[in-house]
Amino acid sequence: MSHDISFLERLLDAPGPSGFEARVAGVWRREAEGFAEAWSDVVGNSYAAVRPDARPLVLLAGHIDEIGLQVTHADKSGLLYFGGIGGWDPQVLVGQRVRVLGAKGDVPGVIGRKAIHLIEPKERDKAVKVKKLWIDVGAGSKEELKELGVRVGDPAVLDAGMMRLAGDRVASRAIDNRVGAFVVLEALRMVAEGEGRSGAVAVATAQEEIGYSGGGARASAFGLSPDVALVVDVTHATDVPEVEKSEVGDHSLGGGPVLTRGSATHPVVFESLAGIAEDRGIPYSIQAAPLRTGTDADAIHLARGGVPTGLVSIPNRYMHSPSEMVAVSDLVHAAELLAAFVERLDEGVDFSRGE
């Protein structure tokens, strides 16, 4: 895997809120078609396969959707009210520029709120709620909105493209979890170029941010019936102020991928990933998940009769904000780890939980 991140930038900049992933999924599949068989399904998942008929078959899953907004009401003055697609801190939305994904193309807008001068002093310290915000695209009436191709139900994203920062760090509104979809496809590229015999299917899963019943990941795992699965998502980097390492663990940008133990993850898969990382000198940290992981792993590991699942996470600063941040080296190491797992997978590996 090269450090050319032009593909990553195309993924991060393409809009794709949960339930509306088509545009960014198209970017992912076009890249996949250069070295794998690619297709999509009715849920919105995108697939890329190398030796799909071989066994054992490994599912590599990273969700491609991002949190976004959706127009819930257009008033007579042309202002748009909205709800969140996924979990937002409304404080980060105030004053942001947005793109409404209308029928005639993207429509630029801004998120409005009553000016600080007009807010009563006793109200200024209270957290703003989404219902007190609106999107202003400059239209003066419902008729103008119609001319722009904007209507109720249209999704929107914050207008914040990928930013290159010092060193190998990048920021974007869509790090969670566009980087997971990036990593699984880069890992599959390595598998295609390698000499392994196992089969692998990378899946850019849909609707994870709103998938309370499993999202697209559940459908993909049921349809593929893999022998083992590796999920790539993000986790909280704890190398910034006011984040408790005692609660989340010690995970830093550039510190390598994070391997999860407990809950939806299988101990044999975890030990294999940790062993490969040790052998290859790939830095990593460990995260405990005593209840649930909050990722696609929760759905995948219970698909059909159960799928042995591992979770590899990328340390991410400023989660669910317009400026999430990761280190590119962590993406590279995660892809290398996944590819090595596929190449080393033994046909006779025993995933039973008995003693």
Image (spheres, grey):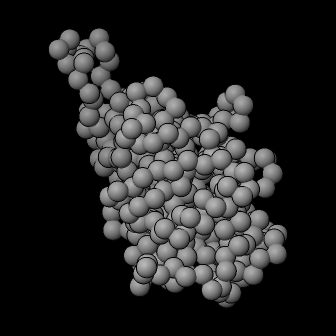
Single out the residue that lies furthest toward the left: 122
**How many discs appear?**
0
Which of the two residues, 17 or 268, is positioned nearer the viewer here? Answer: 268
Residue in view at x 72 percent, y 58 percent = 279
Q: Residue 250: x and y, percent?
A: 50, 39
Q: Residue 100: x and y, percent?
A: 47, 45
Quick check: can you spot residue 208? no
Indicate left or right for 260 with 181 as reference.
left
Which of the two residues, 22 or 313, is positioned nearer the viewer here? Answer: 313
Residue in view at x 34 percent, y 35 percent = 90
Indicate left or right for 64 with 128 as reference.
right
272 versus 89 height, above or below: below
Residue in view at x 41 percent, y 85 percent = 305
Which of the two residues, 11 or 59, is positioned nearer the viewer here? Answer: 59
Indicate left or right for 238 with 69 as reference.
right
Could you say which quadrant of the image residue 241 lies in?
top left
Q: Residue 327: x and y, percent?
A: 64, 40
Q: Residue 215: x and y, percent?
A: 41, 67
Quarter of the image for the C terminus: give it: bottom left
14 versus 245 height, above or below: below
Quarter of the image for the N terminus: give it: bottom right
Quick check: can you spot residue 129? yes
288 versus 164 height, above or below: below
Could you say which quadrant of the image residue 344 lies in?
bottom right
257 versus 161 height, above or below: below
Which of the two residues, 219 or 228, is positioned nearer the viewer here? Answer: 228
Residue in view at x 49 percent, y 75 percent = 308
